[in-house]
Image (spheres, rainbow, N blue to C red):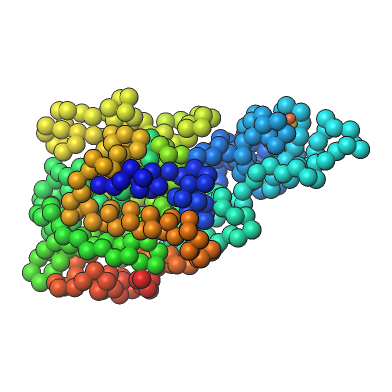
Amino acid sequence: MLSEGDNNTLTQVGPGTPMGTLMRRYWIPAALSNELRADGDPVRLMLLGEKLIAFRATDGKVGVMDHRCPHRCASLFYGRNEEGGIRCIYHGWKFDAEGNCVDMPNVPAHQDFKHRIHAKAYKTVERNGLVWVYMGDQSDIPSLPEIEAVLLPPEKMEFNFAQRSCNWVQALEGDIDTSHVDFLHGGARTERAYAPDDPRRWGAINRSPEYEVKETGWGVMYGAYRPGGPGQTYWRVAQFLFPFWTITPSGPFGDHMYARAWVPMDDTHTMALRVLIRANRPPNAGTEVNLDKVQPNSTDWYGRWRPETTAENDYLIDRHRQRTDSFSGLPGIAPEDQAVTESMGGIIDRRLEHLAPSDRMIAATRRTLLSKAGALANGELAPANDGALYAGVKGGYFLAPDELELTDAYEHASIAAGKRQAPVG
Ligand code: FES
Ligand SMILES: [Fe+2]
């Protein structure tokens, strides 16, 4: 449980809030590069409670700015994206991708003051098929996060956005709670569903793992562990990385390259970005990663990447399947996670919860986020965030000799995978 005040601090991301201020010190993956065409239609983008427009200018540069025109606040969404900038249709003022006013055609030349006018534009960068936005202090910009999965070339990667109609924290908490996997997703699966050498069978045999949790330089790590055969322990290790990233143990530790960002659109809407290796994309159900099927995008503030399953259609639950071959009755892993987290309401009232030992990672992550946001609000946090902190951080499942603690088990798996291990702590 969490007090009302702490819950507000944890969940609210608008301008001036402690968590919103923390979020604004990190690069935010905001859109696919191919959502924006040079001189194409502007896109409405809702990020951290701010209504923005995104457009690609004639030279390919991406502009992301407050949608309100600095003249008299008409929405630039209706603007003309032409010849190197976006032109407001009300009185014709024009802005380049950096937000500079480059034309003020309704004012006589001798009274023109366009050099003093700037749209509230944010720094953008494109890398590997994604548009990133930095919404914090534009004079103190950190490096992009070197999360393994987002560094790979675009032809190797697959990006999927999917919207959740709920607060970002409860959506993210589904990724750091491994004990739901063998119920919500795998409750109907027995050990026989797995090959004899597939470590995941140990999760079907024992559905109540113990947990070890550790704060790290990049966030929080946990390992869920349970017996894995004679002399061996079955580990599922996952990561929370500031401010909204997770790496779930949804693949074998060695070649699992995967990450998810839970980007707050506002306090009750979240855009989840899933990054995975194309080669590892599982062909169908029965695997741990299952993608959201989405509706066609609309131009609404909440119109991008909405799943086909919604609260209105009860997430397409099939009660017959629930009684026979599926624990949840829902049509796949993504709708299962979506249904449970959205069913909690827009923002969970965390005074009503009863956390269990299986929620240790969730409690630790909340604590870490609150203390970081608090330190920032008190002026106790150093300014720049170093993207290199994330290099080599991994998650996944593996077997390790009994009696290892989390840090040693993580090192054991990293060495076995031939990977450089990021220093924990
Ligand atoms: S409101 Fe945009 S030019 Fe006047
Ligand atoms: Fe899940």
| Residue 86 position within the rendered picture, expressed as x and y whole percent measured from the top left | 70, 37
Residue 121 located left or right of residue 82: left
Residue 56 position by quadrant: top right
Q: Is residue 327 above or below residue 23?
A: above
Quadrant where the C terminus sits is bottom left
Quadrant of the rendered image containing residue 391: bottom left
Residue 85: x percent and y percent? 72, 40
Camera-nearest residue between 343 and 227: 343
Q: Residue at x 30, y 25 (%)?
A: 313
Residue 290 is left or right of residue 24, and the answer is left
Residue at the image point whose x is 67% and y is 31% from the top: 73
Q: Residue 114 or 418: which is nearer the viewer? A: 114
- Percent of width and height locating residue 46: 51, 38
From the viewer's side, name the closer residue of 197 and 79: 79
Residue lying at 31% horizontally and 62% vertically, measured from the top left: 221
Q: For ligand 1, give the image quadrant.
A: top right
Determine if residue 326 is in view. yes
Give percent across and percent down for residue 270.
Answer: 42, 41
Classify 370 as above or below 311.
Answer: below
The residue that appears at 56% across and 53% down in the rendered structure is 136
* Residue 79 visible in the displayed image: no
